[in-house]
Amino acid sequence: MKRLLRSKRTSVEFNDDIIACAGLVERGDPDRFRTVMAAPLAARPVMFTLYALNVEVARAPWVTKEAMIAEMRLQWWRDVLEEISLGKAPRRHEVATPLSKILTPGDAKMLDQLVAIRRWDIYKDAFEDADHFTNYIDQTAGHLMVATARCLGECDEAVVRDVAYAAGLAAWFQAVPKLEEEKRIPMVDGRAEAIQELAQSGLDRLTKARKSRSAVSKASRPALWSALSAQKVLQQVIADPYIVAEGAIRPVQGNLAWAAVTGRW
């Protein structure tokens, strides 16, 4: 039997902080902004808050060329999450304040790992190996999706992580040209067959997760809608792995109206 996880949390209402979070997401992550706007009204404050955190953390390593300043920006968020994990009131901030109302101590600790692994973005080192790369995808895309799903309702963590891996991998493939332009080494193995195998692994995990849709409650499903385009992106890469380096992956938008009506992902 699948294990559904949910923790008791304080609900969050729309206020100036949530409006500010929505603005951050709209500017910094328009794809996720669209998924939030398709979600039920009650889910939106939670989703905007968590996605705003992700925008702030994801951009922190890129807004400066000074590694120490980037490290300080990430550490600021780690301090916020530590305060939440210890049950302390965090410093006043338009994202940190509502975040403290929805996260359990355990989820705050998990999201601290999301912040910590973003240190890879600061430097130009290659991934150590395939496990390091997989861990990066899991602790970024995976932790964010799991935290969001948990905050919204009941879910099986393993199912959510499989979906998040596919979504994170699809997004990573699309980001490769920009990362290479920034002198990063985004792929552990850049051979065409290795890229195909990687894309297939993401598609396999997505297919596996979809066989267990019932393990994700209706309330939690909007957290998975950011993966709606993953299948078509991964299928493109499997068909022609060279489009990754060429930046030729065709843009895909998930059918949010269909997802909202059917609850499927």
Image (spheres, rainbow, N blue to C red):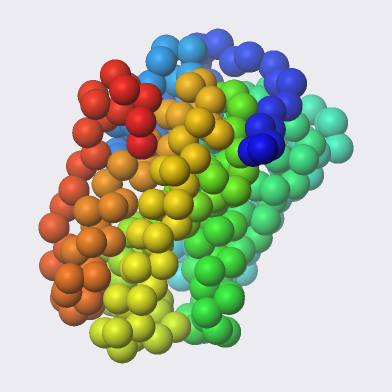
Which percent across, then down, holds residue 8?
A: 74, 21
Which residue corresponds to the image point at 28% horizontal and 52% vertical from the top-left?
231
Quarter of the C terminus within the rendering: top left
Q: Is residue 229 above or below residue 10?
A: below
Which percent across, then down, holds residue 73?
A: 60, 54
Which residue corresponds to the image point at 64% horizontal and 38% vertical from the top-left?
2
Q: How many marks?
A: 0
Quarter of the N terminus within the rendering: top right
Q: Residue furthest front?
A: 1
Nearer to us in this view, 203 or 93: 203
Nearer to us in this view, 44 or 250: 250
Q: Is residue 81 above or below residue 45?
A: below
Is 238 displayed left or right of 92 in the figure? left
- Asked if residue 217 shows in the view, the reply is yes
Q: Is residue 256 above or below residue 178?
A: above
- Asked if residue 27 shows in the view, the reply is no
Which percent across, then down, holds residue 209?
A: 46, 47
Which percent across, then down, holds residue 85?
A: 80, 39
Which residue corresponds to the image point at 29% horizontal and 84% vertical from the top-left?
193
Nearer to us in this view, 171 or 94: 171
Which residue corresponds to the image point at 84% horizontal and 31% vertical from the top-left?
88
